[in-house]
Image (cartoon, rainbow, N blue to C red):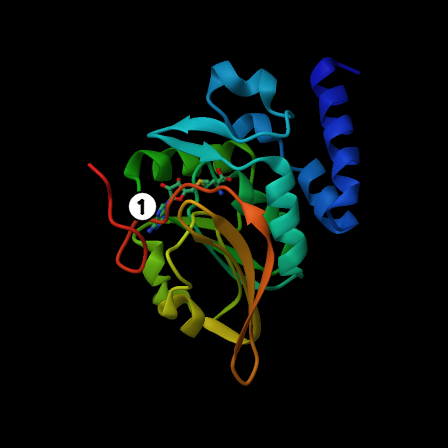
Amino acid sequence: MGSRDLNKEQLLSSLEEVADPRVISAMSHVPRELFLPEPLQSRAYDDTPLPIGRGQTISAPHMVAIMCTILDLQPGMNVLEVGGGSGYHAAVMAELVRPGGQVYSVERIAGLVEAARLNLARAGVENVTVIQSDGSLGLPEHAPYDRISVAATAPSIPEQLKQQLKIEGRMVIPVGEDYQELYLVTRKNGFFAERKMGVIFVPLIGEEGFRERN
Ligand code: SAM
């Protein structure tokens, strides 16, 4: 076994404390190194966020594992991801909704959209569509969604995202600026928001997000 395989094994077993076994199995099928710039590929199985260019990061594996576990993704689901970044988190969700499920991943930065599409193609992921737009407004053309995963922190839970959830749908979203918390939002006869944990994410920049700082 090479050192990268060993690191991967160690990382996956460390996730057993925080993640569902189905999520860990999905993560074992997605090569994180293919979603990183070449000089960082040797660090693919460090449990840390890493830079992917344009001031953005790929989320830490434990955060991907926790968010996927909270969402309870199942085969056949229609999923929206806001903040596609490298495409890694979308690839893990895509594995969890196979067969029959689809992930729409929205990213605002054009260069990252192109890179994510390339990364996903190299990893052989076929059920993710990456779209460049302001995900704080959701993606109405493919709504409603069974699940929405937001990977950038919002000032408050965007109304448009709530409205694009199916009844019984779930959304995970970090909220806050200096101090952020991860929320699970569930839609039933109304919307229920449950605080899960403190987190650190880059800002959601957009109409229902923060303003871009120059
Ligand atoms: N999930 C990603 C991965 O696996 O690589 C990491 C996402 S990174 C922490 C957050 C991303 O959200 C950044 O790429 C950033 O450009 C993007 N973002 C910020 N505001 C956005 C918006 N309004 N719409 C879409 N993407 C946005």
Quadrant position of ligand 1: top left
Tell which residue pokes out farthest to the front in this image. 179
Tell me the quadrant of the picture where the N terminus can be found: top right
Q: Is residue 176 above or below residue 39?
A: below
Q: Is residue 63 above or below residue 192?
A: above
Instruction: Pick the residue in front: 143 or 199.
Output: 199
Position of 116 with respect to 89 (left or right) is left
Q: Position of residue 8 (x, y in %)?
A: 72, 26
Residue at disc 1, secondary structure: loop
Residue type, mark 1 in image: Arg
Tell which residue pokes out farthest to the bottom in this image. 189
Report the number of numbered marks: 1
Instruction: Pick the residue in front: 116 or 164.
Output: 164
Tell me the quadrant of the picture where the C terminus can be found: top left
In percent of the image, x 54 and y 85: which residue is there? 189
Q: Position of residue 155 (x, y in %)?
A: 37, 56
Residue 166 in sight here: yes
In percent of the image, x 28 and y 53: which residue is there? 206
Q: Report if the beta carbon of the residue with label 1 is closer than 8 angstroms to ligand 1.
A: yes
Position of 190 with respect to 132 (left or right) is right
Instruction: Pick the residue in front: 20 or 130.
Output: 20
Q: Is residue 16 above or below residue 100?
A: above
Name the residue carrying label 1: 108
Q: Position of residue 145 (x, y in %)?
A: 50, 67
Residue 98 in sight here: no
Q: Position of residue 130 (x, y in %)?
A: 40, 47
In percent of the image, x 55 and y 19: which residue is there? 41
User: Mark 1 packing: few (<14 Cα in 10 Å), some, or many (20+)?
Assistant: many
Which image quarter: residue 77? bottom right
Which image quarter: residue 44? top right
